[in-house]
Image (spheres, rainbow, N blue to C red):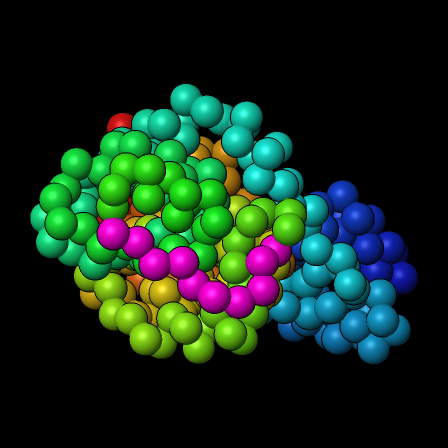
């Protein structure tokens, strides 16, 4: 295949998927890894793509993220199953972090542990926690209108006042190579910092997120247990090699 033909194929695949992995391009185009790397470097110099760890993404293009209202009505049964499993991981007297998101929000009604303290960056979450009389703290910072999540530098500074026994993080993508990812880099910073401040981390993802990659990386698979309602069989072995899977 000629160089320009490879370039056209790479850009076409990027427009279809938003993000492509290096190994995927090697397999599809039948070229060596070094050749594909050179192609990506050249295409980046032409401002046709942006190289990321393990692959490439379209320039200034992020995977669109649905809002809180839209997310609420998607995969309801799966989220309920995951929420029940996650809530069972909370013990009496623990201090936990609940990430903003509909699956972590669903956890709150299933929390049975006593004397729990919760820190969250989710506006809807703190309302639900107060209604259930759970001691709770809402991070200060900029409220992201689309997802009702508090983000930004002030939120990061607030978070450093706490240490957590456990954190429960939402994600938009779970991939064996790229790890856990989310569309918004600012939300990724908050999620990553919560993970760093926690004794143990859990990532909550329904089966539609398995094998997906979005724009901003949170951390590697082995850094957190994965809670899902069902692990697709063709992903089970490769994911299980890197992390503990808790499934219902």
In this rendering, position of residue 127 left or right of residue 248: right
Q: Is residue 221 visible?
A: no
Q: What residue is rendered at 79% in x and 48% in y?
A: 15
Q: Quadrant of residue 136?
A: bottom left
Q: Above or below — where is 74 with respect to 156?
A: above
Q: Quadrant of the C terminus?
A: top left
Asked if one can make out residue 115 in the rendered structure from this viewpoint, the answer is yes
Residue toward you, 111 or 30: 111
Q: Residue furthest top?
A: 77
> What type of secondary structure mainly makes up the magenta span?
strand
- Picture coordinates of residue 113, whole percent (x, y): 14, 42
Residue 37: give x, y in percent of width and height. 68, 71
Q: Nearer the viewer, residue 163 or 189?
A: 163
**Left or right, 133 with reference to 174:** left
Which residues, given as a range, are shown in magenta?
Answer: 135-144
Residue occupying image coordinates x 34% and y 58%: 137
Give how far across and how far down residue 210 sits, in percent.
47, 41
Residue 132: which quarter of the image? top left
Q: Is residue 83 left or right of residue 190?
A: left
Percent of width and height locating residue 95? 21, 58
Which one is nearer the viewer's eye here, 42 or 227? 227
Quarter of the image with the N terminus in it: bottom right
């Amino acid at each position: 295949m000629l160089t320009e033909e490879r370039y056209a194929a790479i850009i076409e695949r990027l427009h279809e998927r938003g993000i492509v992995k290096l190994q995927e391009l090697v397999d599809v185009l039948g070229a060596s890894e070094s050749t594909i790397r050179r192609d990506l470097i050249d295409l980046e110099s032409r401002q046709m793509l942006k190289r990321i760890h393990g692959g490439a993404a379209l320039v200034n293009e992020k995977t669109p993220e649905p809002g809180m209202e839209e997310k609420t009505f998607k995969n309801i049964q799966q989220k309920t199953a995951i929420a029940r499993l996650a809530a069972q991981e909370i013990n009496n007297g623990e201090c936990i972090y609940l990430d903003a998101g509909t699956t972590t929000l669903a956890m709150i009604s299933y929390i049975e542990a006593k004397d729990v303290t919760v820190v969250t960056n989710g506006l809807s979450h703190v309302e639900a926690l107060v209604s259930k009389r759970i001691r709770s703290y809402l991070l200060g910072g900029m409220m992201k209108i689309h997802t009702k999540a508090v983000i930004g530098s002030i939120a990061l500074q607030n978070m450093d006042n706490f240490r957590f026994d456990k954190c429960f993080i939402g994600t938009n993508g779970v991939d064996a190579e790229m790890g856990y990812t989310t569309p918004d880099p600012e939300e990724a910073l908050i999620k990553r910092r919560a993970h760093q401040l926690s004794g143990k981390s859990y990532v909550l993802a329904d089966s539609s997120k398995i094998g997906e990659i979005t724009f901003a990386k949170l951390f590697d698979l082995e850094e957190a247990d994965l809670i899902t309602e069902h692990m697709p069989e063709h992903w089970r072995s490769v994911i299980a090699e890197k992390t503990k899977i808790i499934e219902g």
